[in-house]
Image: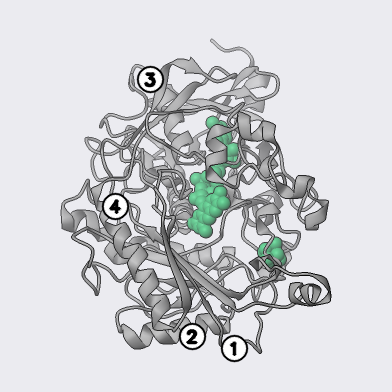
């Protein structure tokens, strides 16, 4: 019998949210606003909005070693250095290193994380697109993996809901493959992008060049202003944190809203190990955690538990959650850990345009253009057969001093302060199919310094993705040709899972506990008061950037959780 009644009361809340990143922030906001006393457990350090964005206003010359990683960093962080940007001094404090946070890979796996309040919502690229009805139906139609247990119509109102609060700039286009949404005014195209749009849309009635849809405020609502957020200033230093709260992050938006209710308790340095399952009650009752700093273990209790630690980390928690009822972790289907997906990228084309040299772009716009999917939709593949498709992100800006000017004296100085031609480029984001053998597991014998078993990844892109990459490269060059771009060059790097930073799957949603970990409301089958609403839940990937879908799934699941709790069902 536990007689520590005071201790238990202090450790008991209505709800627990694990992780304070993109999806955890949403869970915290929704649960707090519905009146639940909510404990948010964040494994990393606390990053306070604005005051802790250390390099947000630093000029290039103020950055350590001109923002170049030290030799020691390069030697110590073999995996992180492969990615090319997590070790730059201006931002490295927000990215997880290989030293304290090792993992194992059987095939190359780039696991790019942020362990701090806000998670990767602070460093993300902010492109925000809905999945389409076609994306939710593809598995079922093609007999791939398992069908999604929900259709687009069920999530569409929740996309509306999260877009309105987050603030997405963009434009409605009436496209079936990229549903419209609730947008603030788009960031204007540059002359080079307008030329691309006109060239592409004249040549192909099937292809569209649309404004990037990015989570930046361009016309803040009263709700956003009340949270202290304001319009984007076009400085494109977002990855270091935004002093204006102009892009969507947990700090600027959801955690702030949760905090305003007075119902949120945020506990940083809290590494959740597992969910506690009570055999007698037949449900989960809390979580076990390890304090990152003191190494002490402790337990917290609640009626509802939301796992939002990010796809791989939430799955690791479910795997660690062993009980008589769940001897292999919280899953009976055998699918936990499988079907890891990511978007494959690093393929596209670049060129220049020497028209409109009397114009320059306005500021440092943090958006660009997007070309929605057309292959296997209204155009067949041309590079062999493959399923699904890809979209492109790109931009066209005047070249500056870094264009590699040579020279001497006054003429050289003049050249340095002038603009070069327009540079225009696009990169493909391709869908990855859900493969059973693309897996993560936990090491049987290796642990980190907190005693947690290391994550082991064994996953790779397969034939379908490689076949698609030919079209991704060739089509990009063709589209640049259509606008009359010059010096067109293509690229196609070797892709690796994780490098798209859209890792998802491994605890998928489905219609039966025999084949999935989560049901259609993101509840763990057999422990229905545990919800997992981050990327782990994804049954397929689409080719659109996924975070908006995690936000919508989270808001939807929180609404359901509270209504079920009120009915006494969980
Ligand atoms: C450079 C970059 C560019 C990106 N661009 C885009 C983009 O343009 N569009 C897009 O849609 N997505 C983009 N992404 C991906 C996007 O950031 C992720 O999809 C999103 O943040 C995932 O949300 P999440 O809540 O699952 O995880 P995260 O935001 O990563 O948050 C997880 C949180 O959980 C915490 N945590 C982990 N384990 C534990 C534990 N055991 N106990 C307690 N807490 C734990 C972490 O510290 C973290 O704070 C980008 C990411 C990066 C890094
Ligand atoms: S570009 Fe906009 S969102 Fe990004 S840091 Fe600047 S003001 Fe903030």
* Label 3, ligand 1: CB separation under 8 Å: no
Q: Residues within 10 Å of mark 4 (few under 14, many from 20)?
A: some
The crowding category of the residue bearing disc 3, from other C-alpha atoms within 10 Å (few below 14, some 14 to 19, many at least 20), is: few
Q: Farthest front residue?
A: 408
Q: Answer yes or no: do the residues labelled 2 and 3 have beta carbons within 8 Å? A: no
CA distance separating discs 1 and 2: 10 Å
How far apart, in angstroms, are the residues tagged by discs 1 and 4? 37 Å
Which residue lies under the disc numbered 4?
466
Secondary structure, mark 3, is: loop
- Tag 4, which secondary structure? helix
Q: Nearer the viewer, mark 3 or mark 4?
A: 4
Q: Position of residue 113 (x, y in %)?
A: 56, 40
Label annotation for residue 279: 3
Residue found at x 61% / y 26% = 100
Q: Residue at x 59, y 34 (%)?
A: 13
Instruction: Tell me if label 1 and label 4 are in contact, CB under 8 Å.
Output: no
Q: How is the image coloured?
A: one colour
For residue 195, the mark is 2
**Is residue 372 at least partly visible in the picture?**
no
Which residue is denoted by mark 1 in the rendering? 356
User: What distance separates the C-alpha of mark 3 from that of mark 4?
Assistant: 47 Å
Work out whether residue 487 can be spotted. yes
Residue 361 percent across, percent down from the top left: 65, 79
- Tell me, yes or no, whether the two marked residues, 1 and 2, touch with CB atoms within 8 Å: yes
């Amino acid at each position: 019998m536990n007689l520590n009644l005071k201790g238990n009361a202090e450790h008991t809340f209505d709800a627990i949210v694990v992780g304070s990143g993109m999806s955890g922030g949403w869970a915290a906001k929704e649960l707090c606003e519905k009146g639940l006393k909510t404990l948010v457990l964040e494994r990393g350090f606390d990053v306070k909005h604005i005051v802790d964005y250390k390099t947000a206003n630093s000029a290039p010359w103020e950055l350590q070693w001109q923002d170049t990683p030290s030799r020691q960093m390069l030697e110590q962080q073999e995996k992180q250095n492969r990615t090319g940007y997590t070790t730059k001094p201006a931002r490295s404090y927000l990215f997880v290193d290989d030293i304290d946070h090792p993992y194992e890979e059987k095939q190359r796996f780039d696991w790019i994380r942020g362990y701090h309040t806000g998670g990767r919502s602070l460093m993300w690229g902010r492109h925000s697109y809905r999945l389409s009805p076609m994306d939710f139906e593809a598995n079922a139609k093609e007999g791939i993996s398992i069908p999604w247990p929900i259709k687009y119509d069920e999530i569409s109102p929740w996309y509306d809901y999260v877009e309105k609060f987050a603030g997405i700039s963009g434009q409605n286009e009436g496209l079936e493959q990229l549903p419209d949404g609730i947008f603030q005014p788009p960031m204007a195209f540059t002359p080079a992008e307008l030329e691309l749009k006109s060239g592409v849309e004249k040549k192909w009635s099937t292809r569209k060049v649309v404004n990037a849809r990015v989570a930046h405020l361009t016309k803040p609502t009263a709700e956003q202003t009340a949270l202290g957020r304001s319009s984007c200033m076009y400085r494109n230093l977002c990855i270091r944190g935004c002093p204006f709260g102009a892009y969507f992050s947990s700090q600027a938006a959801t955690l702030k809203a949760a905090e305003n209710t007075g119902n949120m308790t945020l506990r940083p340095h809290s590494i959740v190990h597992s969910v506690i399952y009570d055999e007698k009650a037949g449900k989960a009752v809390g979580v076990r955690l390890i304090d990152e700093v003191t190494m002490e273990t402790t337990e917290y209790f609640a009626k509802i538990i939301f796992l939002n630690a990010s796809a791989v980390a939430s799955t690791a928690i479910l795997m660690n959650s062993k009980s008589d009822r769940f001897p292999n972790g919280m899953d009976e289907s055998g699918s936990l850990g499988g079907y890891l997906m990511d978007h494959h990228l690093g393929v596209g084309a670049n060129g220049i345009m020497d028209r409109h040299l009397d114009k320059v772009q306005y500021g440092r716009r943090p958006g660009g253009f997007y070309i929605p999917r057309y292959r296997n939709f209204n155009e067949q593949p041309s590079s062999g057969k493959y399923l699904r498709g890809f979209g492109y992100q790109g931009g066209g800006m005047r070249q500056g001093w870094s264009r590699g000017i040579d020279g001497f004296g006054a003429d050289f100085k003049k050249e340095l302060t002038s603009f070069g031609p327009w540079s225009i480029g696009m990169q493909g984001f391709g869908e990855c199919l859900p493969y059973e053998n693309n897996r993560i597991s936990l090491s049987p014998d290796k642990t980190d310094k907190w005693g947690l078993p290391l994550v082991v990844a064994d996953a790779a892109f397969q034939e379908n993705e490689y076949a698609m990459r030919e079209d991704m490269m060739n089509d990009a060059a063709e589209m640049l040709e259509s606008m009359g771009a010059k010096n067109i060059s293509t690229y196609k790097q070797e892709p690796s899972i994780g490098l798209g930073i859209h890792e998802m799957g491994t605890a998928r949603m489905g219609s039966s506990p025999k084949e999935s970990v989560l049901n259609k409301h993101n509840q763990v089958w057999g422990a229905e008061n545990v919800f997992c609403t981050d990327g782990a839940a994804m049954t397929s990937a689409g080719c659109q950037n996924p975070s908006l879908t995690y936000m919508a799934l989270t808001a939807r699941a929180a609404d359901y959780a509270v209504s079920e709790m009120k009915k006494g069902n969980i």
